[in-house]
Image: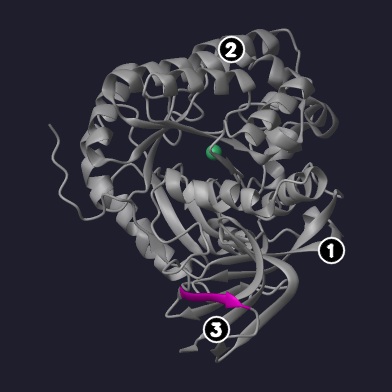
Amino acid sequence: MFYDLIVRGNLVLEDGVIFGEVGVKNETIHHIAPAGSLLGARTLDFGECYVFPGMIDAHVHCFSNPLEGFVTTSSSAAAGGITTMLDMPYDLPAPINSASLLEQKIERLNREALIDIGLWATIAKTGGTDEIIPLAKAGAIAFKMSTFETDPHRFPEIPDSEIMRAMALIRETGLRAAFHAENNELIKSLTKEYMDAGRLYARAHMETRPPVTETSAVLKVLEFAYWTGVKVHIVHVSHPRTIELIKRYKDDQVDVTCETCYPYLLMDVSALEKFGPAAKNNPPLRLAQDAAKLWEQQRKGGINIITSDHAPWGADRKEAGKDNIFLAASGMPGVEIMVPLLFDRAVIQEGVPPEEFAKWMAQSPAEVFGIPGKGKIELGFDADFTVIDPLQSWTIDQTKLLSHSKLSPFHQHKVQGKIRHTIVRGRSVYDGERIVAQPGSGQFIAGAAYKREVVSS
Ligand SMILES: [Zn+2]
């Protein structure tokens, strides 16, 4: 067989690393062989670099800032070694809570994406559950809801009765119902107390969202999932006790998965005190001992996936909180730095085997969200690769991020391990220095209920 492309290097396969090569034909992996044994039109020889399966970021917000969008975020993601991302539904001005809005977004995705992208859907605060089945059929990858109100229209708190109705319907679709789980009432009243007292310093963001505001909201969601039987997913877990609660419900046969985000594993509240708004996210960064326990959970397999929760706020939305942390937008950019930062911490510093790291960053997100053909270097799988040079050191420069958002607490942070190349379905998207693909070369990844008959009982 004469292949379209041969990719050579230290291939990170499911059960270990081999020095070999992959033969790519028609965008998929056709052959895995010892180095130097295949023939093809083009060879990309990465020497001793690791060739990982394409990494997946399941939690990205392209459109919470209209200046960002698919082209910018997917370029930034490709430069960060991400080959597939799942974009959240909380778009400005209109969240994706109807099939027609999802269809419009898919059209835009097909014109603008540089990597492969799946789309989350959500529901209106009230009266929106009729759109759940149409959204699933239109290709939503999963549903996201919140128990915390960030914005009454774009990012609402969904009342309990609507959550129960939604869960019953989502169960029929077979998709996952994911929750931003924070206790709205507790947080709002604590925040008011602090603001009235003029306690506006950076750490106040954490003090007004103590761990119980996360765990009590998660507990409710888990209990609702127990009674409705829906597959549930808890996004951005910040505290180790949440993982303990999830474990108990797993023992109760609830199909629950969870994620944490790179900031919770790599920083603690001291970063919020040091960097202020740039390190503000929801839920907030926790105490150093909590971050350490969360990392322990990650190493033990208690956490399914790690995401960036990339939120591309412009400097203006962050600077607004310079003297009053409550006025700063929550979230930080991440698609471009998450993989190198975690590779450095896990593989370089702690000796996590590369094949284990591949499970965290590629295989597990593909499994949690049911994305066929992605997440592994295996015959018949998409030819998606993240190539990392483990010997190269570099320094993060926030001004050079491709995202619109150029404010990161990791600015000037030294990292070992650099993205050398990013390949999506056999096509180079990032060559280690620049973006080399065109908008529209990425594809829409439909959810498991796409165009399928779903009967609601
Ligand atoms: Zn988010």
**SS under mark 3:** strand
Which label sits on residue 392?
1
Residue 169 x %, y %: 23, 33
Residue tagged 3: 5
Q: Nearer the viewer, mark 2 or mark 3?
A: 3
- Colour approach in the figure: one colour
Q: Give the image quadrant in which the ligand numbered 1 is located.
A: top right
For the point 52% across and 21% down, the residue is: 182
Q: Nearer the viewer, residue 157 or 80?
A: 80
Q: Quadrant of the C terminus?
A: top left
**SS under mark 2:** helix
The reply to whether the C-beta atoms of the residues labelled 3 and 1 are less than 8 Å apart is no
Q: Quadrant of the N terminus?
A: bottom left
The answer for how far apart the CA atoms under marks 3 and 1 are is: 25 Å
- When the figure is inspected, residue 366 is found, relative to residue 231, above or below; the finding is below
Q: Nearer the viewer, residue 395 or 129?
A: 395
Residue 304 x %, y %: 53, 38
- When the figure is inspected, residue 77 is found, relative to residue 282, above or below; the finding is below
- When the figure is inspected, residue 437 is found, relative to residue 328, above or below; the finding is below
Amino acid at circle 1: Gln
Amino acid at circle 3: Leu
**SS under mark 1:** strand
Amino acid at circle 2: Val
Residue 239 x %, y %: 63, 23
Q: Is residue 30 magenta?
A: yes
For the point 30% across and 53% down, the residue is: 139
- Determine if the C-beta at disc 2 is less than 8 A from ligand 1: no
Which label sits on residue 212?
2
For the point 24% across and 28% down, the residue is: 168
For label 3, count other residues whose C-alpha is less than 10 Å away and answer few (under 14), some (14-19) or many (20+): many
Per the rendered image, the range of residues in magenta is 29-34
